[in-house]
Image (cartoon, rainbow, N blue to C red):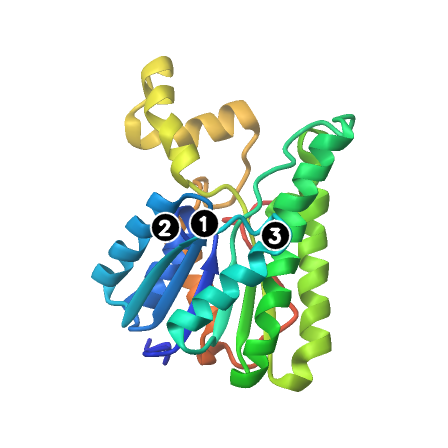
Amino acid sequence: MDLRVRDKAFVVVGGTAGMGLAGATALAAEGAAVAVVGRDDAKAKDAAIALSGAGASSAYGLAYDVSRAGEAVAAVEDAVGLLGRLDGIAVTMGTAGMMPIDSDDEAWDAAFRDVLLATTRSVQAALPHLRETRGAIATTAAYSARAPHEPRLPYASLKAAVATFTRGIARTHGKDGIRANTIAPGAVETDALHAIRGYIAESKGYPYDEALERALREDFGFDAALERPGQPDEIGALIAFLLSDRCGFLTGQTIYVDGGAP
């Protein structure tokens, strides 16, 4: 399917690795111009090179920490200056908060900035530009927002807030032609999860291609219908679709991409 994003311009915050990079790559493969934002300058530059190779009409890697005050605005303005316009933004960062609820206030504050403020600040910075293009927003929550449990309750609570915020943006700015949706992934084999596949295979004697899946089921009670974790490119394809005009009548939704988790 042609997503009709060729020569349109997108920013992916958290786009230097994992699901964000997969989303940026899916847009690049359709001929879009893409700027990815991450904390690490070297990773951002490497991502831009990879995106150019994937077919992006232009690609830029920018180093900003959008959980810090002022940096989301700076990142978006820098990106728009390079891209010339903004047709959509995806925010795929926010992994803090996997901690007990009795964690100290400093840990809670750090999680709040990383998971929620990084998203709200990035979206707010993009809105003036998206009004001009009637653009789109994709944010990321998590399956655990629907099935929270104590070991990661701060994370799940803040991801639920991301979904609520995004729906509010959709309701408020639909009149401007702006669409906003949230993706809530389940277990996805990003770099961190992939890195332990080999360790599990060796330590438990499982075949490499089955090791992670078996450990998730047997040790962590993973009960998804597809009996496997998702892959970043599966989430990336959805990010690209949600930012494209092909998805023109979908807004204000939280889409669970969890392999059929209960």
Is 234 positioned to the left or the right of 68 in the image?
left
- Give the residue type at disc 2: Ala
Which of 48/211 is in front? 48
Q: Are the two marked residues, 1 and 2, in contact with CB atoms closer than 8 angstroms?
A: yes
C-alpha span from label 3 to label 1: 11 Å
Q: What residue is pinned by disc 1?
A: 38
Position above or below: 135 against 11: below
Q: Which residue is drawn at 33% across and 79% down?
A: 7
C-alpha span from label 2 to label 3: 17 Å
x, y percent for residue 227: 45, 40
- Give the residue type at disc 3: Ala
Q: What residue is pinned by disc 3?
A: 118
Q: Are the two marked residues, 3 and 1, in contact with CB atoms closer than 8 angstroms?
A: no
Q: Which mark is residue 256?
A: none
Secondary structure beneath disc 3? helix
Q: Residues within 10 Å of mark 3 (few under 14, many from 20)?
A: many
Q: Earlier in the sequence, mark 1 or mark 2?
A: 1
x, y percent for residue 44: 36, 50
Q: How crowded is mark 1: few (under 14 residues within 10 Å), some or many (20 or more)?
A: many
x, y percent for residue 252: 66, 70
Which of 74/152 is in front? 74
Q: What residue is pinned by disc 2?
A: 44
Is 170 positioned to the left or the right of 75 in the image?
right
